[in-house]
Amino acid sequence: MSKHSSFRHALLGGAIAGLTAAYVVRRQQYAAAAQRYQYPDGKALITGASAGIGAAYAEKLAAIGYDLVLVARREKRLKTFAAQLEATYGVQVECIAADLASQAGIGTVIGRIKTGQDIAFLVNNAGFSTTIPFAELDYTVVDDMARLHVLAVAKLTRAALPSMIAHHAGTVVNVSSLMGYMAEAYHSNYCATKAYLNTFSESLAREVSSLGVTVQALCPGLTDTDFHMSADYDAWDRAAYPAFMWQTADEVVGYSLQHIREGKSGMCITGWLNKVLVLVVRHHVIAPPLMRLFEHVMRLWTAQMARMTNAK
Ligand SMILES: NC(=O)c1ccc[n+]([C@@H]2O[C@H](COP(=O)([O-])OP(=O)(O)OC[C@H]3O[C@@H](n4cnc5c(N)ncnc54)[C@H](OP(=O)(O)O)[C@@H]3O)[C@@H](O)[C@H]2O)c1
């Protein structure tokens, strides 16, 4: 055998051995992640659990046996939901009424996390948006969004991580948005704070995955919840977006938990349509003309819908 061909064989052998080792390590990581997910030792703390995506997390995590700590402002609603979950799934549910757009509210939840040292699954989900032009936006709304989407998430995660690292097990989900990849008029602050969540989560995932902690940024697209029902969304036409673009909160949370069960960390984009959209909007050359085309198609669609409604 020539020197060249034995070198090629050695190279090929090395590559096969390397790939096999990587595959075995990955399978072990998957199995460990699945076990951590299925047999939770600690509790799950979910912010914004009184409705929508947060409530769907509460339901699905209770169904696999997690005791819960639910956080939101509407205490009565939270308590009624907690009682339903306890009766249905036989789990224990604590409620914390806190406004996470305030320093006091953030402090209360940090206090609970530090005292208990028992949070194995943290879902930073609470959020809101508005369609008001930025130049007219109330200063308090600017503060609230920065506290809720940025400071609350970073501080609650900071509070929960030491105990997760000590147990070499834990999950942090930061509910971001497809808008975190986009630049949308009338949503500048929303897009920017969600972009923060994407970068924060992906960077942190790299930092703590070898310490047994999974960090995910969940990026849903249009999701059928109360999110677009606030007074700020009065001028926003929900019917302008075709049915195939909408997902349910259950579907969205299903994608998130599936990724976690499979041991995946970092970004989780919900569904192939949203993945294609991200691919397009992230491409700085093709994004502007394609977005203009999309906006044009949406305008035609809205006009057609209006004509059909008027004709009825
Ligand atoms: N729906 C969508 O199309 C969509 C798409 C992409 C991403 N998202 C993200 O998904 C997350 C959940 O939204 P959703 O669609 O489930 O909306 P939702 O039905 O309006 O629920 C929002 C939740 O956040 C809580 N919340 C809002 N402000 C809060 C505050 N200051 N302090 C504590 N809790 C607060 C609300 O509870 P209380 O009112 O009781 O406090 C409620 O439980 C948000 O982060 C949103 O940005 C939504």
Image (cartoon, rainbow, N blue to C red):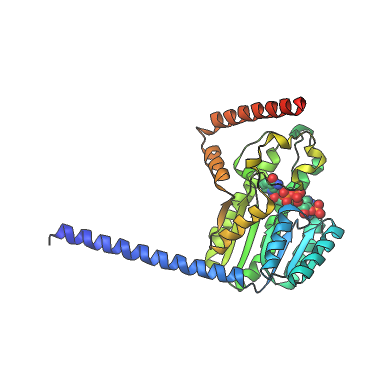
In the image, taking residue 217 as reference, residue 57 lies left or right, namely right
Q: Position of residue 24 (x, y in %)?
A: 42, 68
Kindly give the residue lying farthest to the front in the view shown: 312
Residue found farthest to the right: 76
Residue at 58% x, 32% y is: 291
Q: Residue at x 50, y 67 (%)?
A: 29
Give the quarter of the image for residue 169.
Answer: bottom right
Left or right: where 98 falls relative to 201: right
Where the C terminus falls, by quadrant?
top right
Instruction: State left or right for residue 32 relative to residue 223.
Output: left
Q: Residue at x 71, y 54 (%)?
A: 53
Between 151 and 261, the one lying in front of the other is 261
Residue 109 appears anywhere in the view = yes
Q: Quadrant of the N terminus?
A: bottom left
Q: Quadrant of residue 8?
A: bottom left
| Residue 302 as seen in the image, left or right of residue 206 | right
**Camera-side residue: 120 or 114?**
120
Position of residue 115 measured from the top left corner of the image (x, y, whole percent)? 75, 72
Q: Is residue 102 visible?
A: no
> Residue 267: x and y, percent?
57, 52
How many numbered discs sit on the rendered protein?
0
Above or below, 44 against 302 in this view is below
Residue 153 x %, y %: 69, 56
Question: In this rendering, is residue 283 above or below 12?
Answer: above
**Residue at the image point whose x is 75% and y is 64% from the top:** 110
